[in-house]
Amino acid sequence: MPLMTDKERPAMAANETIGTAYASPPPRQALKWLTARLEVRMLLLAILIAVTLSFASPYFLTTINVLNLLDQSVVVGIVAIGMTFVILTGGIDLSVGAVAGLTGIIFGLVVPELGLPVGALVAIVAGGLIGLVSGVLISYFGLAAFVVTLGMMSIGRSLCYIFSGGISISNIPESLSDFVYTKVAFIPMNVFVLLVLYLLAYLYLGYTKGGRTIYAIGSNAEAARTAGLNVVGYAILPYVVSGALSAVSALLLAGKILSVDPLAGNLLELDAIAAVVIGGASLFGGRGSIIGTLIGVFIMVMIRNGLNLMGVSPFWQGSAIGAIIIAAVLVERLVSRRGAR
Amino acid sequence: MQAAAAKETLFTASGVEKSFGRTRALADASITLRRGEIHALLGANGAGKSTLSRVICGQIRPDAGDIAYRGKPFAIRRARDAIDAGISLVMQETSLAPDLSVVENIFLPELGRPGLPRFGEMRRKAEDILSRLGQRAQLPLDGDVRALSAAQRQLVEIAKALALESDLIIFDEPTASLSPGEVERLFDIMVKLRDEGRALAFVSHRLEEVFAVTDKVTVLREGRTVAADVATAKLTQTELIRHMVGRELSQIYLERAPSEQTQKPVVLEVENLKSAPLVRDVSFSLHRGEIVGLGGLVGAGRSETLEAIFGLRRRDGGAVRLNGKPFAPRKPAQSIRAGIGFVPEDRRRQSIVPDLSVRENLLLAHLGAHRGFGLAYRRRDEKVSELLAMLGLPADRLLDASMLNFSGGMQQKIIIARWLMLDPDVILLDEPTKGVDIGTRSSIYAMLRAIADRGVAVLIVSSDFDELLGICERVVVISDGMSIADMPSAVLDEEKLTLLAAPRTSMERNVRFLRDLAATYRGAAFWGLIEDEKLFCLKVAVADQRAAPGFGDGAAVDFAETRIPAALGAAKSQFVSEADGSLNTLIVDVAGSRGHAMGAAGLVLPHDTEPPDAGQLAAVIQAHYAAHD
């Protein structure tokens, strides 16, 4: 947000004296630090929503419903990881829903021949390859991410129908369902996978060369290039991650309903982008966090679930989600503007 | 000057404060503007000149301070209030709408008022204003502003201010993009406006202009008014500079150690480097612990040379050797690992990563050089504390979320430290003091000197020749993509550097002329500067080896070192024979089309050639130089 132009910055900054910055007493400072963290603010919002919904519906905070909430978070949550990577570089991936659908169909077609593990691997590799194509077109050839992934979305969905013949495939082995719902430390495998993937993404983005490079690319690619970072390679990687994770979520979805449908994952990209944005990421890149995205996913799922429990018509849910997205970004803008002044 | 007695005070501001975030742009600024006066507002970069002028015209609301206009307290809430009150700002980068016509732009503020615009009337009024200024012929009223020159656009801005019947007009660095002739015309207009009884404020950092056109001076330093309302005529340039800088200017540059680079080993050798289109043929070498400047005009290919060395730009030819080994990086990571650092010109665009913390910004080149999956930040902890001590930065500032909170000078020092982190052999800097105020510059110079003393070879590009000569031991001059001279700073000054750096477009004609001259008379022809028993040779053309004068392109030699000492010493417009009778030389002083000195041109002939008529030849040579510029 251009509160000040670059031209005036040096002029204003020239009188800066060092050491006067932290004059406020420590307790207030700690509080300031906490509220300055975007994740903390979003977590507070999430808790507020949870408390409100638990008053609105007695079923909301039951164990069954909480497990249900987590279960509903899996598909969009995993896709949102890849989307966070992409958005951090300043890109966007509109093809995730179509890639999920297509890799699901591919899995359904090959699994009778190749078996579960190899079939799953084929689907994930296929997803990664689609991401690689998008990434190379965007990063190496410099095409707009929006356009490339829009094209990929169209191609992916079309291939879904071609490969499946337009009907759903329901010969998924039941062992996949068993796997998805195996309990690991009291939680189902799919939720476990979700949490492990978030942990890995958190570590990768915060503590590896690649992760920091992804932030640097989104924040200032030119400076990153001058400092010797591999800006082409690490701008491609997020699309590969995004494609592969779309396939993972497609597999978990297939395990849940034991069939794959050419329409599966339709509009998934919008939910994923919404979760990332609610989680505080900037669509211009460089700013955002994986924890924020997870909270964003929970907020979306909770609202859907809560509205269902309260018996609100599903027609209204889109309006609710849309309002939350806009409100989240608006609050964020107002808060950070105050901080900058 | 008119009777200085009772000029009506139009505007006063006192105790004005303004902060942006943590940075204080104005601390205690004050200014008084009177009718019939041109008031200079001076200060170094970042002193708050622009902020104060924007406070005056209502674009910025101050945090504190009293402002009175026409004797009444004046609270400007919006830019519109200032317009209605008759205050206008003529800006450096103009605020015109390029796709609208000149008339529409002049009356742009009118278009913001309710009702239908009356174009006929506007046109008449515009013609009126321009003829009053005596500039009617300068502006096509119906043309798009897009097609106008910088000077014409400024005229539109001025007309815009007059259309509003403004009593108070602020000129914010109005001469930055004008040619000398256009500046004169602007000053005529300003004087006319003053004599009409308006109050004018003139923001500038060009002292000559301040003395040329203003009546009073107010100087700002670090957001404070340090000299208020002083009569311009009572000041000298040195006094003004002292006010602006707060100390003697000569202390800015450090004493240069006597250059002894010849003994030090060569680190970087550049030979006939070529990178189309701007770098055509650049050669020089850099020794350990040496600061070398790359001088030249903007667009001469200096930055591009650095980029080609560093691997940010494709090379089309030539060779670079680093520590004796051929070096041809295809990307920056390779140069960084080989021990080269690069501080580019545009900090905000090419260096700072705003969303990473100060610490990560400091470690960014480390990350680029690092091979491996993790970060290995810990490995640099010791180096980080060492660099922090060098920068004078408390450790807790490392966690600052963004570098943008720092002053330009501190940002630059952090970027330089980013490269020192890797203990480079060579560091390349492009305009290292751009956007850094004068006070902080000296600390950057000290930092560069300290780096060089540790054995790092430092290569600096700067458009500020004074700075280049002040900090560099040697200057390589680049003109139109070619290195044309390599001289110790001690034998150069700004004038000579400027002449050496003159673009080759004018040089090319001269080169052809010298070649023709040498060929026609079967001897050698040269062009250079003669001063104090020294010759700076800009170009030599030799047609007959027997006439070779004993110096080459870009050489700086004592007369005694050449084969024509007698002729150089005599410097008469006739042929002079050397003591041994071997050579006959004619040397002629030449001047450019505007009569400015361009050095001397000479023709050297072997003794057995019959010299032509000296007077006639001198006239031909002088006519050639005067013919173009």
Image (tube, coloured by chain):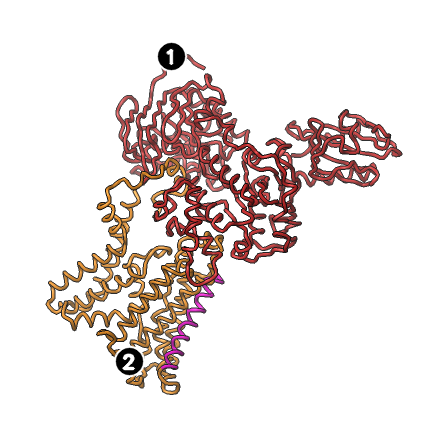
Chain colours: A orange, B red
Report helix, strand or loop for mark 2: helix
Compared with residue A206, is residue A265 higher up or lower down, i.e. above or below?
Answer: below
Residue at 26% from the left image edge and 62% from the top image edge: A296
Compared with residue A309, is residue A13 higher up or lower down, i.e. above or below?
Answer: above
Compared with residue A336, is residue B607 higher up or lower down, i.e. above or below?
Answer: above
The subunit carrying tag 1 is B
Residue A188 screen position, x and y as percent: 24, 75
Q: Amino acid at mark 2?
A: Phe
Q: Which residue is mark 1?
A: B5
Residue A11 screen position, x and y as percent: 40, 37
Residue B414 screen position, x and y as percent: 44, 45
Which one is in front, B203 or A118? Answer: A118
Give the extent of the magenta segment: A117-141
Q: Is residue A225 left or right of residue A212?
A: right
The crowding category of the residue bearing disc 2, from other C-alpha atoms within 10 Å (few below 14, some 14 to 19, many at least 20), is some
The crowding category of the residue bearing disc 1, from other C-alpha atoms within 10 Å (few below 14, some 14 to 19, many at least 20), is few
Which quarter of the picture shows residue A147?
A: bottom left
Q: Which residue is mark 2?
A: A179
Does residue B96 appear in this view?
A: yes
**Circle count:** 2
Compared with residue B42, is residue B289 higher up or lower down, i.e. above or below?
Answer: below
Q: Is residue A90 left or right of residue B275?
A: left
Which one is in front, A51 or A263? Answer: A51
Does residue B156 appear in this view?
A: no
Mark 2 or mark 1, whichever is nearer to me:
2
- Residue at the outermost right position: B608
